[in-house]
Amino acid sequence: MARFLIVEARFYDHLNDMLVDGARTALEAAGHEVEVLTVPGALEIPGAIALATESERYDGYVAVGVVIRGETYHFEIVAGESARGIMALTMDGVAIGNGILTVENEEQAIVRADRHQKDKGGEAAKAALALFALQQRFAA
Ligand SMILES: Nc1c(NC[C@H](O)[C@H](O)[C@H](O)CO)[nH]c(=O)[nH]c1=O
Ligand SMILES: CC(=O)[C@@H](O)COP(=O)(O)O
């Protein structure tokens, strides 16, 4: 059994609950232990994961959050920089699944967050599990 940390950006409560539900369900179904850490927004997720790696407590991470396009360039910053930060950590060998939705509206977010529809939280958890498995394979 491994220990995974779900890092959730709690910007839209109801949507985040759905994503965390999907991620947790997938991780627990695979027999792993799960903890959840909450940060204010998606921009804080890479930093939070970087800090958590220093504890050496977790085998992998699932990032979940929802970024909905507004009126300004802020959407591009939050969507792009959160993904860039996660990818940088991934390239350093951290097993992370990226479940941060970047959508035009709430309707798109619901379909993707719902565990019984597109289940992007579960999909991100499975990506983290796949990278964790690769870590174990190449460490052997
Ligand atoms: N607009 C959204 C944000 N914005 C907040 C940033 O992520 C960040 O918390 C703030 O700039 C302080 O550093 N975050 C989301 O997760 N979703 C959004 O739609
Ligand atoms: C991430 C966003 O674009 C959004 O929440 C911010 O909205 P706005 O650009 O209208 O300030």
Image (cartoon, rainbow, N blue to C red):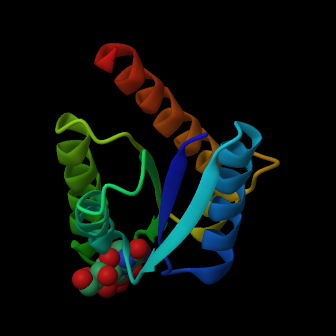
**Residue 84: where, in percent of width, then height?**
20, 50
Q: Which image quarter: residue 2?
A: top right
Residue at the (39%, 84%) spot, across then down: 40
21 and 83: which is toward the camera: 21
Q: Quick check: 105 left or right of 70?
A: right
Q: Quadrant of the N terminus?
A: top right
Q: Which image quarter: residue 78?
A: bottom left
Q: Quick check: 53 left or right of 30?
A: left
Residue at the (49%, 67%) spot, across then down: 66
The number of numbered badges drawn on the structure is: 0
**Residue 95: where, in percent of width, then height?**
37, 39
90 and 101: which is toward the camera: 90
Residue at the (17%, 45%) spot, across then down: 88
Q: Which residue occupies the extreme right position in the image?
A: 116
Q: Quadrant of the C terminus?
A: top left
Residue 118 in sight: no
Residue at the (76%, 51%) spot, across then down: 115
**Residue 128: where, in percent of width, then height?**
47, 38
Q: Quick check: 31 left or right of 132?
A: right
Q: Quick check: 18 left or right of 72?
A: right
Q: Which image quarter: residue 110?
A: bottom right
**Residue 99: where, in percent of width, then height?**
49, 51
Residue 34 in sight: yes
Q: Quadrant of ligand 2?
A: bottom left
